[in-house]
Image (cartoon, rainbow, N blue to C red):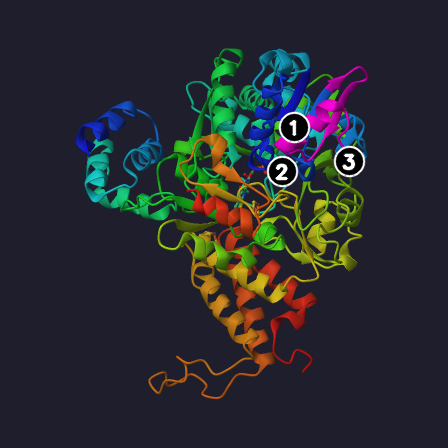
Amino acid sequence: MRVRISNDAVAMACGGEAVAAAFAAAGCAVERVSGWGMHWLEPLVEIEGAKGWTGFGPVAPGDVPAILAGTSALGIGAVAEHPFITAQTRLTFMRAGRIRPLSLDDYAGTGGWQGLARARSLAPAEVVAAVIQSGLRGRGGAGFPAGIKWQKVANAFGGSAAGARKFIVCNADEGDSGTFADRMVMEGDPFALIEGMAIAAHAVGAGAGYIYLRSEYPHAIATMRAAIALAAERIAPFSVELRVGAGAYVCGEETALLNSIEGKRGVVRAKPPLPALQGLFGCPTVVNNVLTLAAVSHILREGGAADYAALGVGRSKGTMPVQLGGNIARGGLVEVPFGITLGELIHDFGGGTASGRPVKAAQVGGPLGAYMPPDQFHLPLDYEAFTAADALIGHAGVVVFDDTADMGRLARFAMEFCAVESCGKCTPCRIGSTRGVELIDRIRAGSTVDALASQPQIRNAPKAAPSRAADIALLEDLCDTMRGASLCALGGFTPYPVLSALKHWPEDFGGDFGA
Amino acid sequence: MDSPSHLAEILAAHAGREGALLPILHDVQAAFGCVTGEAEAAIAEALNLSRAEVHGVVSFYHDFRETADPRPHLQICRAEACQARGVEALMAAAQQAAGTRVALEAVYCLGLCAAGPAARVVGADVGEALHARLDAGSLTRLIEGL
Ligand SMILES: Cc1cc2nc3c(=O)[nH]c(=O)nc-3n(C[C@H](O)[C@H](O)[C@H](O)COP(=O)(O)O)c2cc1C
Ligand code: SF4
Ligand code: FES
């Protein structure tokens, strides 16, 4: 009997290896495939029967005999027909669950390399035009139009590429908590990323590319390494090299990332010059997120750009791979056109909290994203709508919290995270984040007299206990300074989770909040 | 430790590579468990950098250590999604189980955010590296088994 088990990191971390071994021991032919992105069901197993494939999950080794005997209660029917999958519009993730990640045959058999073949039959400027037409915006955080960025790189040196080096850099640092879509692409469909990079290289005239992958992703590193070797011939003369990060969140910022590849401290660079003009080793460079580049291999297929542009709302075109995480009943990957509301994502796809308690908040867009209360869940997933609400789509991680969450503690965590990960280049972020932690602690403790400030040596510090109102005004002022005077979004956006928590849940900041 | 010859091998393997410092440091860290002052000096020499430049890079990144710590290292995710799934409530028992024998480190996201609390055994084989849906019992067993 044929059995398919995912080798996505979630399945492995939940014991997928032992389940695969149990099926193999029972005489089954086990195939390791990419993950469907239904993380609450991992390890998810598919069994081939007379009527096609049937899914079971979450499976432990002890469930194997019952599954083989047809008496298991873990069955969910055909996975491809599951409402969690059929309600999605999977383009970037069209192969998720359906292929062996490192099989060149499976890739070519599912439309792989069509985008690259078509791109190479077009003039570079036509490839750029197709990406602009699709409306694709960067999926790494800032939402900058991908085609416009490519055009800048293509036109560097006045468009005459003779002898000039250019690079394609894939940002696979995926440091935002609550996100895993990049990881799933690299573990489940690595050739799609490589194909997207090769298309970008043709469009801008780049000869080499780098993938900067965080060290926290051992499975993705192994799969990506193998895929690069397998695809080398297919993408030549373009070549791709993998570089592994070293545990610094700020290296996800594109200029810090370039410094890191160059072998330097991951310190953010001032812009200008833009990386498009002076990027890696001083050369014109495209820096794009994994999802941006993977989407391109679909967009460049016949009719792909128009299909992509037809999806979405306003200036947010196409689909977004949303990641549902945290305290959620059905967490995983949900690729849908822009325009869906947060409430639909959390309740219809996610099924509410895993704990069964009411939802208190959702943080969207990673550690720099705002905490949103349920009365904002009508917001459509749309870059402009989120910006107008002082919120962030970012890399589209949605982390759900139930009513036991302490929002004051989470606000403190946001400041602490900024302090730990700050690259140190600018003062509002490096010093402000530490002062922010102290201030939130003081507010939560009831705005007591500061032990240090009460020393006689500190002559100009007030000796009376500050009022809560004064401390909160100080925190808001600090956040204002960080927002306005930081060089990058680490210092500049940390105020969003802090201020949103303070605004919507003042009662979680201790003290006499009503006063 | 046969470090001088082994270090020379690592340096030779990366000779001529553009931006070779991080790959070299990863290899040195993997081979010796740390990047010592002597290693920094040799790397600086090979890459035509100052010792200060190399040290600046080593000290910037969380992954590199200046002294070896032979204990098993377990990274426990303390980021928001794992907090939402209750990781903080497990930490006291985890510390208890680890004692001074196992080094517990904080990590911010392992990409297993819908299946937290999550942990990674540093330096383990790929298949054994990641663990998810941890509760007090399974986390304690994981630590005790290291
Ligand atoms: C502190 C910080 C961390 C970031 N982390 C990431 C990351 O992990 N992955 C990513 O793709 N972009 C990240 N970005 C955004 C990048 O700077 C950049 O905008 C992006 O890689 C551009 O690619 P895109 O246009 O395809 O989104 C981060 C930005 C900041 C300020
Ligand atoms: S805001 Fe923080 S991380 Fe960004 S450049 Fe300034 S110090 Fe570095
Ligand atoms: S937040 Fe813990 S694995 Fe992502």
Chain of the residue under label 3: A
Q: Position of residue B14 (x, y in %)?
A: 30, 25
Q: Which residues are magenta?
A: A48-73
Residue at horizontal 52%, vertical 71%? A441
Q: Earlier in the sequence, mark 3 or mark 2?
A: 3
| Label 3 residue SS | helix
- Height in image: A146 above or below B132? above
Q: Is mark 2 within 8 Å of ligand 1?
A: yes
Chain of the residue under label 1: A
- The kind of residue tagged 1 is Ala
> Is A60 contained in the magenta span?
yes
- The kind of residue tagged 2 is Arg
Instruction: Characterize the local packing of mark 1: few (<14), some (14-19) or many (20 or more) Cα atoms within 10 angstroms.
Output: many
Chain of the residue under label 2: A
| Structural distance between the alpha carbons of marks 3 and 2 | 22 Å
Residue A403 quadrant: bottom right
The disc at residue A84 is 3
Q: Position of residue A256 (x, y in %)?
A: 44, 43
